Image (cartoon, rainbow, N blue to C red):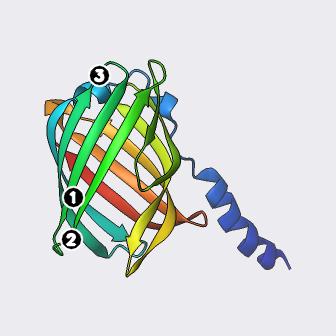
Amino acid sequence: MKSIYFLILTPLLFLLGCQNLHIDDFKNTKPRLVIEDYFNGQSEAWGIFEDRFGKIRAQFYVDIDGSWDGKTLTLTENFFYSSGRKDLRIWKINKINENMYEGYADDVLGKAEGKSEGNAFNWNYKMRLPYKDSFIKVSLEDWLFLQEKEVLINKANVRKFGVVIGTISIFFK
């Protein structure tokens, strides 16, 4: 009987011990990331999508044009996939206060919410992702980290029904 409890409790305790990132942990990190400054103008990104088993399912390049009007950051993102597929996403990101943002795009369901501290930005939203000949609804949690020499690293977990089905890694310059 004790071995059954051990088999049940050990994974549960392990999962409870695994803590997610918290934006406040990055409060004093540098260089400071201000997304409306970083994305104002032209930038480029390169990325991959890995499924939950670590298999790379997509590779892509993104050409980004950003403009900041003092309240709203507009990002026009042109995606070019190695498969030949192309996508366009236009973000409208409103700055709520010094650290809080909300954003909208055509394939985003409802509102995206973000918070920045130090060199980090955490962005959460639900969206429709192309899948085979249709779309699936997923939740994304993006973590962006500004590095030296204007390099921005983005890692996003993609979830369906609360389970991670893949990870997106993107590098901006």
How far apart marks 2 and 1 lie (CA) works out to: 8 Å
Q: Are marks 2 and 1 in contact (CB under 8 Å)?
A: yes
Count residues near mark 2 (Cα–Cα under 10 Å), then give few for <14, some for 14-19, many for 20+: few
Q: Is residue 11 left or right of residue 170?
A: right
Measuring from the top left, give residue 12's x and y in whole percent. 69, 63
Picture coordinates of residue 86, whole percent (x, y): 21, 65
Looking at the rendered image, the quarter that the N terminus falls into is bottom right
Distance (Cα) linking label 3 and label 2: 31 Å
Q: Position of residue 115 (x, y in %)?
A: 47, 31
Determine the residue located farthest toward the right in the rendered image.
Answer: 1
Q: Is residue 39 visible?
A: no
| Quarter the C terminus occupies | top left
* Label 3 vs 2, first from the N-terminus: 3
Q: In this view, does 126 lie above or below 160?
A: above
Residue that carries the numbered disc 1 in the rendered image: 79
For disc 3, the marked residue is: 69
**Tags 3 and 2 in contact by the CB under 8 Å rule?**
no
Three-letter code, disc 3: Asp
The disc placed on residue 105 is none
- How far apart are the alpha carbons under marks 1 and 3? 24 Å
Amino acid type, label 2: Arg
Which disc, if any, is residue 85?
A: 2
Judged from the image, the secondary structure of the residue bearing numbered disc 3 is loop
